[in-house]
Amino acid sequence: MANTIELEQIKSLLPQWVEESRQLAVQGKVAAYIPELAKSPRDTLGIYIMDTAGGSVAAGDCSFSFTMQSISKVFTLIIALMEHGEAAVFSKVGMEPTGDNFNSMLKLELVAPSRPFNPLINAGAIAVTSLIGGDSPHERSSKILQFFRLLAGNDTLDYDLDVYQSESDTGHLNRSLAYYLKDKGILNDNVEDVLDIYFRHCAVKVTCSDLARMALVLALGGIDPSTGKSIIPRRYVQIAKVFMTTCGMYNASGEFAINVGLPAKSGVSGGILSIVPGRYGIGVVGPALNKKGNSVAGVNLLEKLSGEFEWSLF
Ligand SMILES: NC(=O)CC[C@H](N)C(=O)O
């Protein structure tokens, strides 16, 4: 179906669907292991969809801002690939899902070498972040933030310093993962430096429209929709999409592939970035999470959309 006709249909259906999906938030829980995230309003639900021709649809709580958390890992992977290429990145992380929690230590010890299974689990993302170069932790963080701003088409993107501080004060499990990787020679960086960079990129504050714009660049195979120029090599977008499909929704990635069938990445703040390749960039937020750590209402909304408009890639 032509995008413009479909977008009009989405526009008319979406407000009602948002209200229906919002009802499911009571089944979920807001993440509390980062204390600052526990303050998020459970019933919030927003979605923003951008198409390749400049059209967009917004519904629900689109002015709500939230931190990217694990969604940022997709883009730090891309930066590391652009700086160092595939061989260097895949010497530090694998290409396979784990079946374990995103912050699990288990396979690092069980499987030799202790290379994290993929770049979207915490251990893998920390290893990838350690590859991003610069003269100081500040310079490395700035480079990441600038790239996120470019992708979002929003020069005002910045850190939520309360969330950053909260995670920095309590992120001892991530610290232990990083020290373990340092011991095993996977991480060559100063551990506290790399964690600071990691906590900062997780704490970049966005709205659904920022996520949709970042997603749109991926949907376009790396083309900046404002300039028509390539800002990410197509091959690296392909790699990112594969990881989003196989590992992007934690241990529910298989279920999500069956029920929605789109590359997606979620974060513990309740955000989900998803794409319909060649067509749409989508940003969703709903802070109440299901047992697998994904936004209950957000996943439900994406299921409705994909089902109705037959977006599944499979
Ligand atoms: N799943 C997530 O969104 C995790 C990101 C979070 N900053 C953490 O490291 O625990």
Image (cartoon, rainbow, N blue to C red):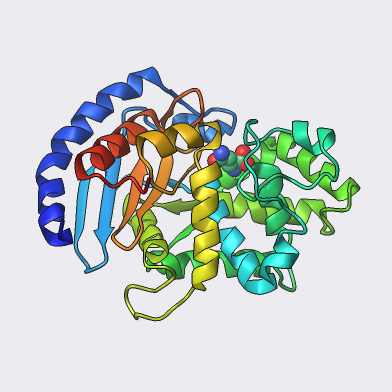
Residue shown at 60% from the left, 59% from the top:
77
In-image side of 130 versus 266 (left or right): right
Image region (quadrant) for ligand 1 = top right
Corner quadrant of residue 211? bottom left
Pinpoint residue 300: horizontal percent, then vertical percent: 31, 31
Pinpoint residue 85: horizontal percent, then vertical percent: 67, 70
Can residue 166 be seen at all in this image of the molecule? Answer: no
Look at the picture and state if 81 lies above or below 1.
below
Can residue 18 be seen at all in this image of the molecule? Answer: yes
Q: Which is more toward the observer, 297 or 96?
A: 96
Numbered marks: total: 0
Look at the picture and state if 92 lies above or below 177.
below
Pinpoint residue 214: horizontal percent, then vertical percent: 41, 61
Residue shown at 60% from the left, 53% from the top:
200
Corner quadrant of residue 83? bottom right
Look at the picture and state if 129 lies above or below 82.
above
Q: In the rendered image, which quarter contains the C terminus?
A: top left
Q: Which is more toward the observer, 298 or 220?
A: 220
Q: In the rendered image, which quarter contains the N terminus?
A: bottom left
In-image side of 93 versus 312 (left or right): right
Q: Residue furthest top?
A: 27
Residue shown at 74% from the left, 73% from the top:
135
Q: Which is more toward the observer, 184 or 305?
A: 305
Pinpoint residue 224: horizontal percent, then vertical percent: 38, 74
In-image side of 101 versus 308 (left or right): right
Q: Residue furthest front?
A: 314
Q: Which is more toward the observer, 52 or 257?
A: 257
Look at the picture and state if 198 lies above or below 89.
above
In-image side of 214 versus 102 (left or right): left
